[in-house]
Amino acid sequence: MISSVTAFAEYWQRIHTRTREMVAAIPEESLDWRPAEGEFTCAELVRHIASARRMNVVSATLGEGVYPGHDERFGISRRDLLHYLDASHAEVSNRLAGLRDDDLAEPRVSNQGQPYPAWNILLALVEHEVHHRAQLAMYLTLLGIEPPALFGLHVEKLRTS
């Protein structure tokens, strides 16, 4: 359970920073690449992450956020995608700034039409983002590009006992 908006906002900043680093590592020529037919392209994943952020933070603060989609109107180039990602981060940060700690326990109607405490929707926002950021890391690996290290260290460099 999240009990402090301030603590969550600080954590959210780090989530955004790591996602932004992952997006910045995608080569411009690979934005339309997808690992298989029917899967998201790299660009679609980025737009989906940013759009889902918006939907979830509206759900957590006002209730019933609507998914705005992930089509090309939200950006095609890496620069535009980073701009959309940053804009969604600013929206989340601004909405969190208007939230009180007491609001976190208040039920909000999610995009699925079910009431959940606001803190639960914020946790879902993070879980969703991390899931898709991991997909982007795998996409980069499949493209032969080493993804950015998480917390500055790749798993291959960890010491074992």
Image (cartoon, grey):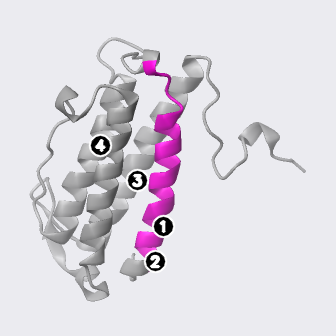
**Residue indicated by mark 4:** 84
Indicate which disc residue 7 carries: 2
| Secondary structure at numbered mark 2 | helix
Could you say which is closer to the camera, residue 145 or residue 122? 145
Circles 4, 2 touching at the beta carbon (< 8 Å): no
Disc 2 marks a residue whose amino acid type is Ala
SS class, disc 1: helix
Question: Residue at position x 27%, y 88% from top?
Answer: 102
Q: Position of residue 43 (x, y in %)?
A: 34, 27
Name the spot of residue 3 as percent of width and height, x first.
Answer: 38, 82
Q: Mark 4 to mark 2: distance in Å?
A: 24 Å
Q: Residue at x 47, y 56 (%)?
A: 15
Kind of residue sitting beneath label 4: Tyr
- Count residues near mark 1 (Cα–Cα under 10 Å), then give few for <14, some for 14-19, many for 20+: few
Between discs 4 and 1, the one toward the N terminus: 1
Q: Which residue is most to the bottom?
A: 102
Amino acid tagged 1: Tyr
Identity of the residue drawn at 86% across and 47% down: 160
Q: Nearer the viewer, residue 25 or 1?
A: 25
